[in-house]
Image: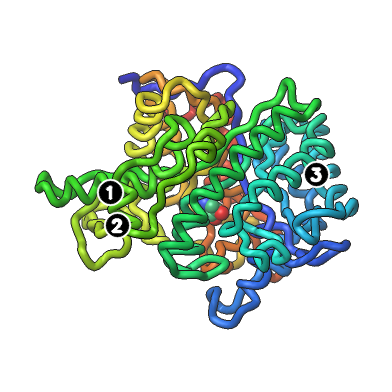
Amino acid sequence: MSDSNRFPEGFLWGAATSAYQIEGSPLADGAAPSNWHRFSHTLGMTTNGDTGDIACDHYRRYQADVDLMASLGLNAYRFSISWSRVLPNGVGKVNDIGVDFYSRLVDALLDKGIKPNATLFHWDLPVALEDRGGWQNRDISEWFADYASIMFDKLGDRVPMWATVNEPWVIMDGGYMHGTLAPGHRSAYEAAIVSHNILRAHGRGVQAFRANKHNANSQIGLVVNLEPKYPASDSAEDIAATARADAYMNRQYLDPAMLGSYPTELREVFGDAWQEWPADDMKLIQEKFDFLGINYYTRGVTRHDPASIPVHASKVYQPDHVYMETGWEVFPDALRRVLVWVKERYGDIPLYITENGSCFYDAPVAIDGVLDDPLRVDCLKGNLHAVSQAISEGAPVKGYFAWSLLDNFEWSHGYSRRFGLVHVDYSTQERTIKSSGKVYSNVIRTSGAVLDK
Ligand code: IFM
């Protein structure tokens, strides 16, 4: 295994964000509320009652943020589109002013030589659709395909990289199994249906992409969050628990999308809530796409735990390791391992790290334009080293997007959790490049060579 850090020619060096987390102005210019607008405005659902009403005010400051990206040397930027900004009712009449925001953003990126990478769904669903059952309604695959077609028509001439859905597992587990994310439901029955409908929508999104004349030279992918599972011991119980946890979190979406069938362990995990899904659905879900986006944050050392629903498995704390504010263990080698595993299990599809980052405390205000974040710097270097090792072991990784460009609205944790390479002072909206942002910029400038030092 090589110790030097090398990344291939044409490697994408990016950063990622999502609409509800940074844009603010969620109801401006004809936009309608999303389920996240409603959820965050519901008493008790977010830390301090935080909402995305202002967030990073990116809706109005996007040009300055693109300039910031350019100053960091990014050659790619991953953002998401707010469905309810462009289709206030989720379907039907297009809100041209909403589309225009994304059109201007894309032009600003291209103007700086930054490749736009657009995600169609990063968790904010129009309430108009939520009120029709949202992800539980089978019709959502058609609603999604119509929305996707509109965006391909409007931006497809300029956006070379698209993703259908960000992190289906989190939408299902947080939104429908445990109720910690919008829409806050707790039902294994709903969760199972939601998982399946997300995949059907993804399949229809890919079909719509192929049917659109703009997309001949561009690519579409699916973005999943992967968390490698390691057994806490070699007991049969812990090994079985590890397999269930892995099926639930890592294989639930990739197996059907890439191999055509759900992992058998899901019947055990979901119990009676799991169904025999129609063969036509399974065919649709397998629609071939062009790249896989992998979001990686941590691993899970797993033990059998009957009290933990629904997987009957829980994570074991590693006393001598560094943990993030989110409770996630820092363990870069799991990133290397997961990239190699994906290639071995699913074949040679191009891989992008579409999110990777860390959450550590930063002061709310940067003093004299300086924000030192040594723990995030260590994490970033370790993770990039792991990516380079995975590449040298044959994983076809084509790009890396740091999560996140900016500190932002971390869902139910509101603004209490910071992941940015760039600090945001929420009282003034002032941006300050953190030490981690400077390190990343140097990595980009030297194509990774600076990591060898
Ligand atoms: O902020 C989120 C992002 O929206 C999805 N992936 C994980 C990030 C950190 O929790």
Residue depicted at x 48% and y 62%: 190
Q: Which residue is mark 2?
A: 311
In primary-sequence order, the first of circles 3 and 1 is: 3
Q: Are marks 2 and 1 in contact (CB under 8 Å)?
A: yes
Ligand 1 within 8 A of label 1's CB?
A: no
Find residue 90 and name its label.
Answer: none
Q: Which residue is mark 3?
A: 105
For the residues labelled 2 and 1, the Cα–Cα distance comes to 6 Å
Residue depicted at x 74% and y 67%: 33
The answer to whether 336 is drawn above or below residue 170 in the figure is: above
Residue type beneath disc 1: Arg
Q: Which residue is mark 1?
A: 244
Label 2: how many residues lie within 10 Å, few (<14), some (14-19) or many (20+)?
many
Ligand 1 within 8 A of label 2's CB?
A: no
Classify residue 157 by image quadrant: top right
Label 1: how many residues lie within 10 Å, few (<14), some (14-19) or many (20+)?
many
